[in-house]
Image (cartoon, rainbow, N blue to C red):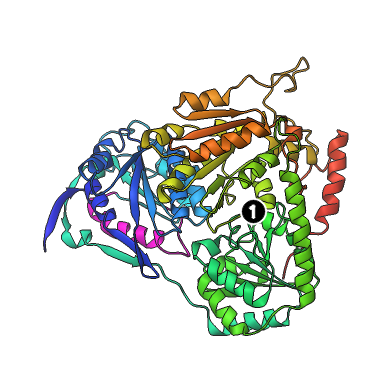
Amino acid sequence: MTTRRLTTAQALVAFLARQYTERDGRRHRLIGATWGIFGHGNVAGVGQALLEAHEDMPYLQGRNEQAMVHAAVGHARQSRRLSAQAVTTSIGPGATNLVTGAALATINHLPVLLLPGDTFATRPADPVLQQLEVPYAGDVSVNDCLRPVSRWFDRIVRPEALVPAALQAVRVLTDPAQTGAVTLALPQDVQAEAYDWPEEFFAERTWQIRRPRPDAEALAQAAAAVRSARRPLLVAGGGVHHSEAEEALRAFADATGIPVASTQAGKGSLPYDHPCDIGGIGHTGTATADDLARTADLVIGVGTRWSDFTTASSTLFRHETVRFVNLNITAFDAHKMAGLSVVADARASLEELTAALGDHRVDAGHRARYTSAKAAWEERVTAAFTAHDPDAAPTQAQVLGALDALVTGDDILINAAGSLPGDLHKLWRSRSADQYHVEYGYSCMGYEIPAAIGVAMAAPGRPVWALVGDGTYLMNPTEIVTAVQEGVPIRMVILQNHGYASIGGLSESVGAERYGTAYRHRAADGSFTGPPLPVDLAANAESLGMRVIRARSVRDLREALAEARAADVPTCVYVETGTADTVSGPPGAQAWWDVPVAETATRPSAVKAREEYDRQAAARRRHL
């Protein structure tokens, strides 16, 4: 048997550089690059291996470990999960900083390979620097924090253990039903240890991304349910995008006339101007979608995991005999809502269901009702987007309106947290399948800027916008430096509203009176109600190397956005949208969200909020 003598780290990098995916005849490199911040736990192992293999494995220098995972996740989502990136860190705080990013990746079913250093397998000294000592277990390290947020976890305590572990890691990364964060913890001494590796380990491997077809009986039952429904509704989730099922969904909608609502992850599955598209659903959805959901007698979920925002905390679907059909590649999600489970690829399921339905079409009255409601909602969107005084400071919705007037289907918008996801889900007019990139499975503040870098690397030449509030910006601006270093021309829009505006609004609604949500000096009574803090985020972004354009009015904003879109360097548009009380002007929530309110309180605001909570909670329903 032919062997090659390499360190464990060198062998891992060489293996990863030769892994490919293939779906529908298109081949992609699986691990396109490795992000890394080096410390004593990986600099002489994985770091040295990346140096030797720099022509085979591109290296990307990050500034924050969590942000590196976000960048890799953004890249994977834009690549439809057919290509991923790896992230390496030292043991200690570098490794534990991965946990948030890993949770985001796993919740959103997006592949990322994590390669944290680990404490010595040979234990030459005990403890070593950054080792967590656990009195009851000698084999535990801080990397065990990654177990519950990883789809696959292994610790490589001997070089030869890498062979089965690496193959299992790639199996999970390329499994559309199981993918998420995969962790290979690498003790620093094992990384540098040499071993004679079988040459076959380094052969090119192509992993076929499967498209499992639906079970014939389950499909027949689903078709029968659709035919018998009088007011059906389809809910498109992120699985539509992961499966590249947008054209199959369009064909289904064209053939049947069934209205299509979308989750945050599924928005853009149909373009906003398709006759059957009725926009976002749930707590942040449109009145059109939510009203249809309340009266639907059949709900077809495609690639959705039915989160509480989508179901309005189990209060949205109110028809007394409503039933669910779930097309999902994951059996766990297909079973939810006590639905009829069709466990299969989203595209394959939609294609076969369309064929099985033949010439079936919903009645004209149903189509007329949602068509009229959709037109009325579009008028409300236009009103929220319209600024009547071009010299006034814009509202948050008017910022989105200025973008809406500028972008084409080439542009990609990225957001994750704050009040923006709600405004975007209700208002944004998606023009292409991948334009709307809102991470709401984990709704992680700090995701937007690094994710924009990963997306821009996966979609070179396309305008990529990171939309961030001041709270999110302050969480994680460090990867601006990476964008500048790599020459990635991301566009960032900072909306300054002096605090956690989204939570401020929620706080007020649950009787907590916006406590602790504003960025203000303390007043004489000790409350945070003094003047806004003198924080200059534009100057901060500029100090990190970004070009910054300040917009003080709607007129300035329109010019600044156009200038940023045409830029070939990382560019920021900074706009102050006023206080938390005037953050946005779109219609309010069209459905409830369960955030428990104090059952007993002395302050009138909380007492009143509890009365409203009890009224809304009474509508909760378990679908059985």
Q: Using the image, determine if residue 40 lies above or below residue 292.
A: above
Q: Residue at x 86, y 33 (%)?
A: 603
Look at label 1 and name its amino acid.
Arg
Quadrant of the image containing the N terminus:
bottom left
Q: How many numbered marks, from 0 up?
A: 1
Give the camera-side residue of 21 and 517: 21
Give the camera-side residue of 436 and 416: 436
Can you give x and y, in whole percent of width and height, for residue 606 in the image?
83, 38
In the rendered structure, the answer to whether residue 119 lies left or right of residue 546 reads left
Residue 599 magenta: no
Q: Which residue is drawn at 48% across and 29% down?
A: 547
From where the camera sits, is residue 96 visible? no
Q: Using the image, determine if residue 470 lies above or below residue 587.
A: above
Residue 180 magenta: yes
Magenta stretch: dominant secondary structure = helix
Quadrant of the image containing the C terminus:
bottom right
Can you give x and y, in whole percent of width and height, for residue 136 in the image?
43, 42
Q: Dot 1: within a 10 Å radius of its alpha carbon, few (fewer than 14), some, or many (20 or more) residues? A: many
Q: Which residue lies furthest to the left in this view?
A: 2
Mark 1: secondary structure: loop
Q: Which residue is drawn at 55% across and 47% down?
A: 413
Can you give x and y, in whole percent of width and height, for residue 244 in the image?
49, 65
Can you give x and y, in whole percent of width and height, for residue 517 in the image?
69, 31
Instruction: Name the residue beneath numbered marker 1.
Output: 429
From where the camera sits, is residue 617 visible? yes
Give the camera-side residue of 565 and 76: 565
The residues colored magenta run 157-181
